[in-house]
Amino acid sequence: MTKANEKTIVQELYKTKRNINKEYKRGHIIKSALIGIILGDASMTQPNMLYIRHGARQLDYVNEKVDFLKDYMEPVSLRSSIDKKGYKYRYAYYRNRKLSYFYKIIYKNKRKTITPELLNHFDKISLAFLYMDDGSLSLRKYKDKNGNWTGSYKSREIYLCTHSFSLNEVKMFIKMLKDKFGLRFRMTLDKGRPRIWCNTKNTKKIIEIVRPFISKFKTMSYKLDLKY
């Protein structure tokens, strides 16, 4: 074998390794994203079925999700509809054996459940997608001496809807956010169900954590705008 042939083989091996690493990284990103998506607005009625639905203000967000997931799986159905009250919806329906992995770690007795096993897989990407799905950014303004709202903001808070989980599950989730990301969330009860929120200091932290991922979704850019 000539030196030229050896060089070519080595180059091909490095190229193959780079491609494998790239595919592995892409696969990891998708899996982390799906954890956040399923914990958020998506639902699974069976291990191999995923159902994504958003309302009128987020129709294009469904399209962005479908585009993001296309290298991993394609929807068997993608459509829009209007209900009897005239409210618009956009649906993406998936049927794929790959989904059984997520059903196993997220669903217990047919219910979304926060467990230590699930939290071991929860990362910055999962947090970004959960925030896009089930998070809200609250900007509170100052009032002047006459009680009128001013143009200045006194606080910026993020809320995550965790209503479907038990108190113990939410406490476990709050601890994980602190341990993994240094984020301090507090829990309140909304109609008897737990919801968590963080103050301005922690809102700034979480935005910096999720910005690299959310910035790729144009429809969600408003959730990054702290009005500074």
Image: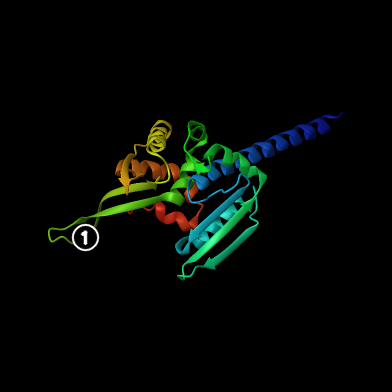
Q: Quadrant of residue 16?
A: top right
Identify the residue at image location x=63%, y=59%. 77
Secondary structure at badge 1 equals strand
Residue beneath the point at 38% across and 53% down = 225
For residue 78, side relative to residue 182 (left or right): right
In the image: residue 218, left or right of residue 148: right
Residue situated furthest left in the rendering:
145
Above or below, comparing residue 106 to residue 3 in the picture: below
Q: Position of residue 122 (x, y in %)?
A: 49, 37
Q: Please rate how many residues cluster around mark 1, counting C-alpha atoms within 10 Å: few if below 14, some from 14 to 19, many from 20.
A: few
Q: Is residue 228 visible?
A: no
Residue 191 screen position, x and y as percent:
32, 49
Which residue reaches farthest front? Answer: 109
Q: Horizontal and vertical percent for residue 125?
A: 50, 42
Say above or below: 56 vs 157.
below
**Amino acid of disc 1:** Trp
Whether residue 49 can be seen here: yes
Which color mode does the image show?
rainbow
24 vs 147, left or right, is right
Q: Residue at x 51, y 35 (%)?
A: 118
Tell me the residue that label 1 is attached to: 149
Nearer to us in this view, 120 or 164: 164
Image: 130 above or below 181: below
